[in-house]
C-alpha cells in the first residue's frame, strides 16, 4: 500500500497544493462583489500570490539541491491551503493581499522539493512521471475553483474546507513517506545526488528556455484570471457559474497535461513544447474575437492543450539543461512557470479597466508568439 501511495504521492500532493492556487482566480468575482474592487486591484491579489513565489522558489530550489528537505512538501501545501481558508476572516482588501502573499510562499516551499522527489523516484519514462506530477497540479487548479465556488452558495466560511484538505494531505504524507519509506527515499536521494553532481549545466540553453517558461506562465496566469471575468462581462454568464467555466478549463488541462507528458516520451520534449505553442495561437484568436458562447467553449480545448501540454516537458527540459542543479531548475520551471505570469496580470487588468477585457487579452498573441519563436531556437538536451 505504501509503495502505491509513494508512486502517486507527488501528483496527489501537487493536487492538494494547487487547490489553493487555483481557487484564488475563482474567488476574484467574489472579491469584486464584496469589496468593490476594480480589475487592477483584483489582478493585484494574484500578483501578491506570485511575487513572493517568483523570488523564493529559485532560492528554495537551490536549498533542495544542497540538502534533502522533505518536510518542505507537507509544510508548503499546508501554508497554502490554510492561508486560503483564513480569507474567510478577511475584513479588508489589504488583509486579502497579505494572505495571498503567504499562500504564495507556501507554494514556493512545496514545488522544488516535490519535483525532485519525482526525479529521484523515477528511473525511466521521466516524461510520463513528470506528466503525472503536472496532472496533479492541473487537477488541483481544476478542483480548486469548483470548491471555491461554494462561497457563492454558503459564504466565506466554506473556505475552511481547504484546511481540512491540508490536514488529510499531511496525514497521507506521514503515513507514506516516514519510517521505512523514508529510508527508501533517502537511498534514492543519495543515488540522485551522485548522478546530479556528475552532470553538466547548459546555462545558455536554460536561458533561452526561460523565455518559453515566461511565455507559458503569462498565458496560464492571465487566462486563469480572465476566463471567469470574460464569461461574466462578455458572454453575460452568471457569476456563480463563472467558477464552473474555470473548472472546466482546468479539468481539460489536467487531461491534456498528462497527454503532453506521454507525448514527450515519444515525440520529444522540445517538439511537444513547439506543438503546444503552434496550436495555442489560432485558438486564442477565436477565443478573443468570437465573443459568444460557441467561441468561448469552442476555443477552450485547443487553447488548454497549448498551455497545459507544455508543463511537464518544460520541467524535464529544465532539469536536463541544468543536470547539476535540478532543484534550482525545478524552482524556475515549476515555480516561475506558474507564478511569473501573475507579475504581469495587474498590467493586463489595468488595460481592461482602460479599454475592455477583449482588448486586454490581445496581449496574449505576441506573448504566445515569443514562446513559439524561442522554442525553435532551442535544441534537445543530450
Image (spheres, rainbow, N blue to C red):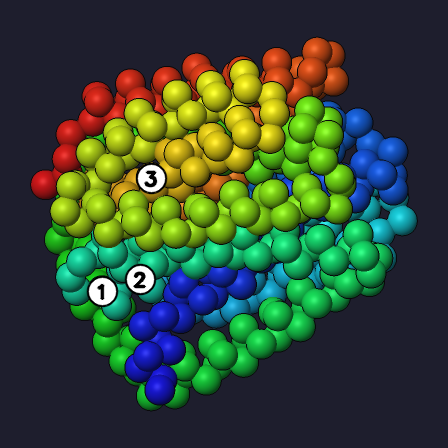
- Which class describes the residues within 10 Å of circle 2: few (<14), some (14-19), or many (20+)? many
Residue identified by numbered label 3:
310
- Which class describes the residues within 10 Å of circle 3: few (<14), some (14-19), or many (20+)? many
Relative to 98, say whether 126 is above or below: below
Coordinates of residue 321 in the picture (x, y in percent)? 21, 40
Residue under the image location 45 percent in, 66 percent down: 12
What is the CA distance from the residue labelled 2 to the residue labelled 3? 17 Å
Total marks shown come to 3
Residue identified by numbered label 1:
122
Relative to 182, say whether 226 is above or below: above
Instruction: Find out whether the residues at labels 2 and 1 contact each other: C-beta distance under 8 Å.
Output: yes
Q: Secondary structure at mark 2?
A: helix
- Which class describes the residues within 10 Å of circle 1: few (<14), some (14-19), or many (20+)? some
- Looking at the rendered image, the quarter that the N terminus falls into is bottom left
Any part of residue 328 in sight: no
Q: Earlier in the sequence, mark 2 or mark 3?
A: 2
Coordinates of residue 218 in the picture (x, y in percent)? 49, 29
What is the CA distance from the residue labelled 1 to the residue labelled 3? 20 Å
Residue identified by numbered label 2:
118
Q: Secondary structure at mark 3?
A: loop
Question: For residue 343, what is the image quadrant?
Answer: top right
Amino acid at each position: 500500500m505504501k509503495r502505491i501511495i509513494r508512486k502517486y504521492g507527488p501528483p496527489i500532493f501537487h493536487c492538494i497544493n494547487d487547490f489553493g492556487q487555483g481557487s484564488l482566480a475563482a474567488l476574484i468575482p467574489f472579491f469584486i462583489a464584496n469589496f468593490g474592487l476594480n480589475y487592477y486591484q483584483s489582478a493585484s491579489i494574484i500578483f501578491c500570490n506570485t511575487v513572493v513565489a517568483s523570488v523564493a522558489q529559485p532560492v528554495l530550489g537551490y536549498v533542495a539541491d544542497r540538502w534533502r528537505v522533505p518536510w518542505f512538501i507537507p509544510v508548503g501545501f499546508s501554508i497554502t491551503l490554510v492561508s486560503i481558508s483564513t480569507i474567510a476572516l478577511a475584513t479588508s482588501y489589504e488583509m486579502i493581499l497579505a494572505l495571498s502573499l503567504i499562500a504564495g510562499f507556501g507554494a514556493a516551499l512545496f514545488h522544488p522539493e516535490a519535483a525532485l522527489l519525482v526525479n529521484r523516484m523515477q528511473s525511466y519514462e521521466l516524461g510520463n512521471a513528470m506528466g503525472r506530477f503536472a496532472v496533479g497540479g492541473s487537477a488541483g487548479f481544476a478542483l480548486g475553483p469548483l470548491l471555491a465556488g461554494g462561497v457563492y452558495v454558503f459564504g466565506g466560511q466554506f473556505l475552511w474546507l481547504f484546511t481540512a484538505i491540508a490536514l488529510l494531505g499531511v496525514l497521507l504524507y506521514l503515513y507514506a513517506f516516514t519510517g521505512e519509506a523514508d529510508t527508501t527515499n533517502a537511498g534514492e536521494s543519495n543515488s540522485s545526488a551522485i548522478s546530479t553532481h556528475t552532470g553538466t549545466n547548459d546555462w545558455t540553453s536554460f536561458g533561452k528556455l526561460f523565455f518559453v517558461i515566461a511565455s507559458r506562465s503569462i498565458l496560464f496566469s492571465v487566462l486563469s484570471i480572465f476566463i471567469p471575468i470574460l464569461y461574466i462581462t462578455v458572454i453575460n454568464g452568471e457569476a456563480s457559474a463563472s467558477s464552473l467555466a474555470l473548472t472546466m478549463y482546468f479539468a481539460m488541462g489536467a487531461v491534456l497535461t498528462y497527454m503532453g507528458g506521454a507525448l514527450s516520451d515519444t515525440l520529444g520534449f522540445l517538439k511537444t513544447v513547439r506543438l503546444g505553442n503552434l496550436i495555442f495561437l489560432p485558438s486564442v484568436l477565436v477565443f478573443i474575437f468570437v465573443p459568444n458562447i460557441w467561441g468561448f467553449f469552442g476555443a477552450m480545448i485547443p487553447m488548454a492543450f497549448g498551455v497545459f501540454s507544455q508543463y511537464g516537458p518544460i520541467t524535464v527540459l529544465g532539469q536536463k539543461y541544468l543536470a547539476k542543479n535540478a532543484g534550482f531548475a525545478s524552482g524556475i520551471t515549476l515555480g516561475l512557470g506558474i507564478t511569473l505570469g501573475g507579475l504581469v496580470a495587474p498590467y493586463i487588468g489595468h488595460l481592461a479597466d482602460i479599454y475592455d477585457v477583449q482588448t486586454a487579452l490581445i496581449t496574449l498573441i505576441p506573448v504566445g508568439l515569443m514562446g513559439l519563436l524561442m522554442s525553435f531556437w532551442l535544441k534537445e538536451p543530450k
